Image: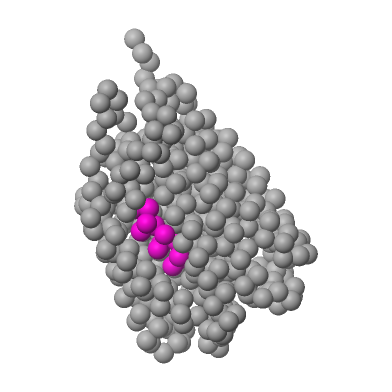
Amino acid sequence: MQKTPRTLPATQVLLCGGIIVTLSLGIRHGFGLWMLPITQQMGWTRETFALAIAIQNLSWGVLGIFGGMLADRYGAFRVLLGGTLLYAAGLLGMALSPTPFLFALTTGVLIGAAQAGTTYSIIYGVIGRQIAPERRSWAMGVAAAAGSFGQFLLMPVEGQMILRMGWQPALLAIVALALLMAPLAFGLREPDFHARHATLRTQTVRHALAEALRHPPYLLLTAGYFVCGFQVTFIAVHLPGYLSDKGLSPQVSAFALAIVGLLNIVGSYSAGLLGQRFQKRWILAFIYATRALVIALFLLAPVSPLSVYVFAAAMGLLWLSTVPPTNAAVAQIFGLQHFSMLSGFSFFSHQLGSFMGVWLGGYLYDRSGNYDMVWMIAIALSVMATLLNLPVKETPMHRPLTQSA
C-alpha cells in the first residue's frame, strides 16, 4: 500500500512563507527611497539608478523561471536559502559599489536573482502542494497580503534609517534583515517532497511549457501581468522623485508608500478570498480598469499631501491584488507539477513590464524633465490589460492518461 505523503501544517506554511515574503518585498519596495540620496552623493543621474532597478526586475523575471524549475524539482527549501545569501550579497554591493557598472551588477543582477528565489513563485509552489485546492486562492491572498505588510512595516523604518544614519549605513543594516529569511526557510522544508513529486511526474518541463505557450488563456494572463509590473514598479521607484519635484517632502513619499503597503494587505487578501467565489478574469479586469481611473483622477487633482495619501490608499487596494487571482488561475488550469515554473514564466512578463516602467520613467524624465508621458502610458496599459483578461477561461487542462494534480 502506497504511503500518503505528509504535509506541513497550514499555519506553519503561511507564517514562515508570509514572513519571508514580508522581508523580501518589504526591503525591495523601499528602494525608491534610496534614489535621491544615492544619485546626489554619487553624482549619478536618475536614469543610472533607474537602470539598475530595471535590470533587477529583469533579472528577477528571467531567473525566476529557473528558480521555479529548481523548486519544482528539488523543493523550495534549497532555493530559499540560496536566495537569502544572494540578497545579502546584493545589498552589500548596493551600499559599497563605486561605479554605475558595479551598482547595476549588484543592485540589479544579484538582488534580482535573490528575489527570484525568495518571493511568490517559490512560496506559492509550497502553498499549492501543502494546502487544499479549496483554500488555495485564499492562502495565496494571505501570502500576498504579507508582502504588502512588509511594505507598510519597513517603508517608514527604512525612511527613518536613511534620515538618521545616512543611506550607506542604513543599507548595511538592512543586510541583517535579509538574513532572517534563512532560518524561516527551514519551516518550509517539505516532508516527503520527492515522494509527492513522483506521484505528480506526468510531464516533462519541455512539454509543460509548450502546452502553456499554446494555451490562449495563459498567454492573456501573462500579457496582463506585464501591465501590473509596469505600473507598480514605476510608482514605487519614481513616486518619491515625482513628489519631490512637486515640492513635497521625502516624508510624504515614505508615508504614501507605507499607505500603499497597508491598504494592499486588504486588497491582496480580498482578491484571494474573492478568487474562491468568482472567476478570476472578472477580478483582474476590475483591478486594471480601476487602476486607470485612479491614476487619471490623481493627475487631474491638485498635488497636496491629502491627494497623495488618497491616491496611495486607492492604489494600495489594487497594488498586488493581481497576484493571487493570476497564480490561482495558473494552478487551476495546469495543476501543480510545474506550477512554480509556469508561475515564474508568467512573472517574467510582469518583470519585463517592471523593467520598462522603471527604466522608461528615468529615461523620459531625464529628457523631458517630468513624468507626464509615463503616467499616460500607465493609463493606456490599464485599459489594454482590462480587455486582455476578460476572455480568460479557467477550465483545467484535460490530459489523457494523466493524473490530475
Observer-nearest of 166 and 227: 227
Q: Position of residue 51 (x, y in %)?
A: 61, 66
Taking the spot 41% from the left edge, 49% from the top edge, the residue there is 346
Q: Is residue 302 visible?
A: yes
In magenta segment, residue 320: no
Name the quarter where the C terminus is drawn. top left
Residue depicted at 63% across the width and 53% down the height? 109
Q: Nearer the viewer, residue 163 or 383?
A: 383
The image shows residue 211 at horizontal and vertical percentages of 34, 38
Residue extending farthest right: 98
| Total residue callouts | 0
In the rendered image, the vertical position of residue 145 relative to residue 292, given as above or below: above
Place residue 400 in its image quadrant.
top left
- Residue 36's place in the image compared with 58, above or below, is below
Q: Which residues are magenta?
A: 221-232
Image quarter hosting the N terminus: top left
The image shows residue 133, relative to residue 90, as above or below, that is above
Main SS, magenta residues: helix
Residue 337: x %, y % from top left: 39, 32
Identify which residue is drawn at 21% across, 52% down. 278
